[in-house]
Image (cartoon, grey):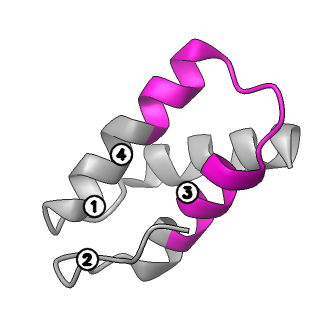
Amino acid sequence: MIERPESVVDVDAWDDLQELDQHGHGLTTWESDWIESVLQQLRAGRRLTDKQRAKLESIREERL
């Protein structure tokens, strides 16, 4: 697991994304790219939107 940068304020989202990145099975290219994009957003100190949170939960249900 990558150490969480101090700039991350949405800790739960960070942890969920790290778990998915490390343990997700069969991620599509789009899902992998989406995860990286959202991680960059979190590193910039932003929070997930409700829509992004819902998508994250959907991917986690399918891949973990």
Amino acid type, residue under disc 2 in the picture: Pro
Amino acid type, residue under disc 3 in the picture: Leu
SS at mark 4? helix
Q: Position of residue 62 (x, y in %)?
A: 86, 38
- In primary-sequence order, the first of circles 4 and 2 is 2
Residue identified by numbered label 3: 17
Amino acid type, residue under disc 1 in the picture: Leu
Q: Which residues are magenta?
A: 15-35
For residue 45, above or below residue 39: below
Residue identified by numbered label 2: 5
Q: Residue at x 52, y 54 (%)?
A: 53
SS at mark 2? loop
Assess whether residue 29 is covered by the magenta stretch. yes
CB under 8 Å between discs 1 and 4 = yes
CB under 8 Å between discs 4 and 3 = yes
Q: What kind of secondary structure does the magenta stretch mostly adopt?
A: helix
Amino acid type, residue under disc 4 in the picture: Val
Residue identified by numbered label 1: 42
Q: Residue at x 35, y 51 (%)?
A: 39
For the residues labelled 2 and 3, the Cα–Cα distance comes to 14 Å
Quadrant location, the N terminus: bottom right
Q: Residue at x 75, y 49 (%)?
A: 60
- In primary-sequence order, the first of circles 2 and 1 is 2
For the residues labelled 4 and 3, the Cα–Cα distance comes to 8 Å
Assess whether residue 20 is covered by the magenta stretch. yes
Q: Which mark is residue 58?
A: none
